[in-house]
Image: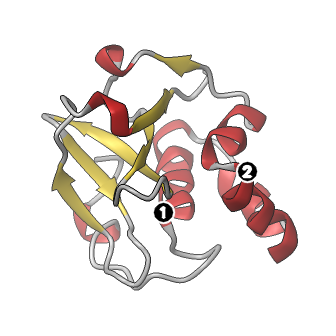
Amino acid sequence: LAADPDLWIGRVWALKKSDCASLAAEYQDKQFNADYMATIKGYSLKKWGEYFHRGMVAWLEDFGMPKVALEDRQLHDVVVYDYDGDHNMHVGTYLGDNKLLHHLPNKLSSIDVVDFTETDKFLGVYRHAV
């Protein structure tokens, strides 16, 4: 992990502060000395809601993160997927060994094993552009 795992897991969910996208952005910031969280904090709730409506793929593309193939995923890539079968776009950070750091609504942030063979539920894998 980019830092002590205790910094990433067990967080209480809060929109724009500790939701799935904010957790991924903060991780990317620490790993790559980037500035994604500053951008998120500058969004109005309306703009942030538009990304949730349009989809998190649009958010990552607007950040300029290139899309890579699911089978080419690497440590620290951001994964967008449908976690519940209702096409709710969810974002997590790939940690290797099929583990994903993520934050589901109204749950604590966690690291879980994800079945990457269920390819139809994955909407994109994005990599920080160095």
Q: Residue at x 45, y 81 (%)?
A: 13
In the displayed structure, 80 sits above or below 106; it is above
Label 1 secondary element = helix
Q: Amino acid at mark 2?
A: Arg
The tag on residue 54 is 2
Nearest the viewer among 122 and 97 is 122
In the picture of the structure, the residue carrying the numbered disc 1 is 20
Q: Residue at x 42, y 15 (%)?
A: 69
Q: Is residue 44 visible?
A: no
Nearest the viewer among 100 and 42 is 100
Q: Which percent across, then down, holds residue 126? A: 52, 29
Q: Amino acid at mark 1?
A: Cys
Q: Is residue 46 left or right of residue 129?
A: right
Nearest the viewer among 60 and 83 is 83
Could you say which quadrant of the image residue 40 lies in?
Answer: bottom right
Q: Earlier in the sequence, mark 1 or mark 2?
A: 1
Q: Is residue 16 left or right of residue 40?
A: left
Label 2 secondary element = helix
